[in-house]
Image (tube, grey):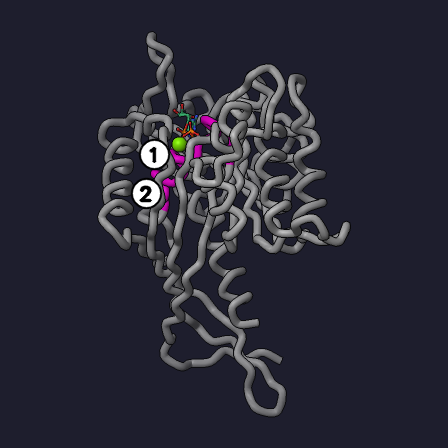
Amino acid sequence: MATISNAVPPTARTLKRIGVWGAPESGKTTFLAALNVAVARSSTDLLIYGTDDEATEFLAENTAMLTSQRRFPAATETNRPLSWTMHIPSQRPVAKRFGRQAIEPVNLQFNIDLLDAPGRHMASVRLAGGRAGEELFGDDDPASEPEEVIEHLAGCDGIVFLFDPIREQTEGDAYEYFQGTLLRMAQRRFGQGGAPTAKLPQHLAVCVTKLDAPAVYRRAKLGGYRTFDENDPYLFPRVHDDSAAHFFAELCRASDLGNADLVPKAISHYFRPERVKYFITSAIGFYVGGGASRFREHDYQNAVRESDGSYHIRGPIHPINVVEPLLWLAKCLAMDQRA
Ligand SMILES: Nc1nc2c(ncn2[C@@H]2O[C@H](COP(=O)(O)OP(=O)(O)OP(=O)(O)O)[C@@H](O)[C@H]2O)c(=O)[nH]1
Ligand SMILES: [Mg+2]
């Protein structure tokens, strides 16, 4: 039986690589940019900082962009490696004498090496119709940026996969981007001789983005997925982790244009089920302002479209499930290290 130890928490350092994967405009850069705010708003005692100037600059610049300028980051033009450290209070099981186990508190110092890459680098191989992937992968240049992305993802311990239901409705290309990357990762892992049942080793946090967008929020509400946490002073709507996988599958099935319904199948074919978890997220969260102190059903949109087609953010950002996928990955990877 496990007992709680009273020892002073030791610090466990781990160097892990986390990849962020998603189609263009799926929200990768905004998700990372919102992380700083998500950490600051978290009820857990977390800390995040860059381990070099580039990573610190990214956090500082993009946090200011979202919070002061109230604009979204620009589309990513080129691969940008980012190296951060997160401090996470956690617990780990330790073996005691006589075959007993104890749970001990531990401060995880989690070094995250990320690559923020343009989504177009994750396109499929030689797509029909001259889409982005054709010219990008055409010469198979190993030094090219798309190759660097695949190389990075294949070598990651954990992956945050972002699925944007809005883009899927207009472009219908989520599966295209998903399977292009997946096949190349599998090729690197298994080569020519992989067993048919072999799975990729990574932990995968599947994150549906833009819950705050009306098309996604309405579907969550009408489908009965919406919940409220009574401990949340803002009473923001969420989708509980237990039903996140169902909601994700429903959004994938709802795609009239593309083949997104194949994405959940592909996930279960390529990844171990116990290493996959689903999160319904929003980097900017819902609007609270104009004298209101909590979420209001009739005025929740935080991203509004301007006449030039760009979006601006109306009020403070309240990221939803942005830090949680990383916390989950950190915990899984800390356990793995122990094994
Ligand atoms: N409503 C809403 N829109 C978002 C959110 N996050 C991103 N967006 C929108 O999605 C657009 C693209 O976001 P990015 O973060 O640049 O997406 P990306 O995946 O990094 O795109 P590339 O770098 O081009 O691959 C933004 O300009 C916003 O319009 C969100 O949390 N809510
Ligand atoms: Mg980007």
Magenta stretch: includes residue 23? yes
Q: Going by the picture, which residue comes out furthest to the right?
A: 196
Residue 238 visible at all: no
Q: In the displayed structure, does residue 125 sit left or right of residue 108? A: right
Is residue 185 toward the left or the right of residue 214 in the image? right
Query: Which kind of residue does numbered mark 2 sit on?
Result: Val
Q: Nearer the viewer, residue 28 or 125?
A: 125
Magenta stretch holds residue 62: no
Q: What stretch is highlighted in magenta?
A: 22-38
| Residue that appears at 34% across and 34% down | 317
Q: For residue 180, which quarter of the picture?
A: top right
In the picture, residue 138 is in which quadrant?
A: top right
- Give the answer, above or below, for where 13 lies relative to 220: below
**Where's ligand 2: which quadrant?**
top left
Going from the N terminus, do you reach mark 2 or mark 1 first? 2
Q: Position of residue 290 (x, y in %)?
A: 30, 24
Binning the other alpha carbons within 10 Å of mark 1 as few (below 14), some (14 to 19) or many (20 upward) gives many
Do we see residue 296 in this rendering?
Answer: yes
Residue in the foreground of this view, choosing between 196 and 164: 196
Q: How many marks?
A: 2
Q: Position of residue 12 (x, y in %)?
A: 40, 70
Q: Nearer the viewer, residue 257 or 278?
A: 257
Residue that mark 2 sits on: 37
Q: Name the residue under label 1.
A: 317
Question: What's the residue at 37%, 72% (across, down)?
Answer: 11
Where 44 falls versus 336 (above or below)?
Answer: above
At mark 1, the secondary structure is loop
Please state the horizontal and vertical placement of residue 325, each as a whole percent of the image.
49, 48
Label 2 SS = helix
Residue at 44 percent of width and 65 percent of height: 90
